[in-house]
Image: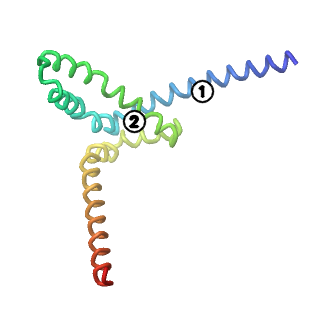
């Protein structure tokens, strides 16, 4: 019984260390993908400034030196913090191998073009979705009016 228990403990440690290594490997790969794809830049750009500006309105008595220092502190850690929020989601949907394939894509001219256009495309997608929803809304109102509602 002691031998079986010992083997179980040893396997638990081995698999725990493998999981930690895979996590570290995944985090490293994800960070590279997030940098090359522009995900981090697009999400962090202007974020610190928006938070600081909002807080300045709430705390008008705080001197500008504090806000400048705080802004610098937040800017330094922004990408790391955002990456930590995102890595869990990506780990649920992608393997390290898949992340590495995506990295290879973002190293191509097409991948770099995709990354550079992604902020513009996201806005375009949002606007297209809003126009589509407005159209559905209008068509449904017209239909309801025709039916006497």
SS at mark 1 in the image: helix
The C terminus, quarter of image: bottom left
Residue position for label 2: 33
Q: Is residue 72 above or below residue 103?
A: above
The x and y percentages for residue 106 are 36, 41
Query: At x 45% / y 27%, what residue is drawn?
Result: 28
Tell me the residue at 68%/21% (across/down).
14
Would you name the residue on which mark 1 appears? 19
* Quadrant holding the N terminus: top right
For marks 2 and 1, give the one nearer the viewer. 1
In front here: 101 or 4? 4
Q: Which mark is residue 50?
A: none
Q: Is residue 65 above or below residue 83?
A: above
Residue 82: percent from left, percent from top: 36, 31
In space, the residues marked 2 and 1 are separated at their CA atoms by: 20 Å
**Badge 2, how many Cα within 10 Å: few under 14, some, many 20+?**
many
Q: Position of residue 23 (x, y in %)?
A: 53, 28
């Amino acid at each position: 019984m002691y031998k079986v228990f010992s083997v179980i403990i040893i396997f638990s440690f081995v698999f725990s260390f493998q999981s930690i290594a895979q996590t570290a490997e995944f985090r490293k790969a994800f960070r590279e993908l997030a940098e090359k794809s522009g995900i981090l830049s697009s999400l962090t750009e202007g974020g610190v400034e928006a938070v600081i500006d909002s807080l300045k309105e709430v705390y008008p008595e705080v001197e500008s030196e504090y806000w400048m220092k705080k802004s610098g502190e937040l800017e330094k850690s922004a990408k790391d913090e955002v990456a930590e929020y995102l890595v869990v989601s990506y780990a649920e949907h992608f393997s390290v191998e898949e992340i590495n394939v995506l990295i290879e894509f973002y190293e191509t001219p097409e991948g770099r073009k995709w990354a550079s256009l992604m902020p513009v495309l996201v806005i375009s997608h949002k606007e297209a979705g809003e126009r589509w929803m407005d159209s559905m809304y209008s068509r449904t109102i017209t239909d309801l009016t025709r039916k006497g509602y």
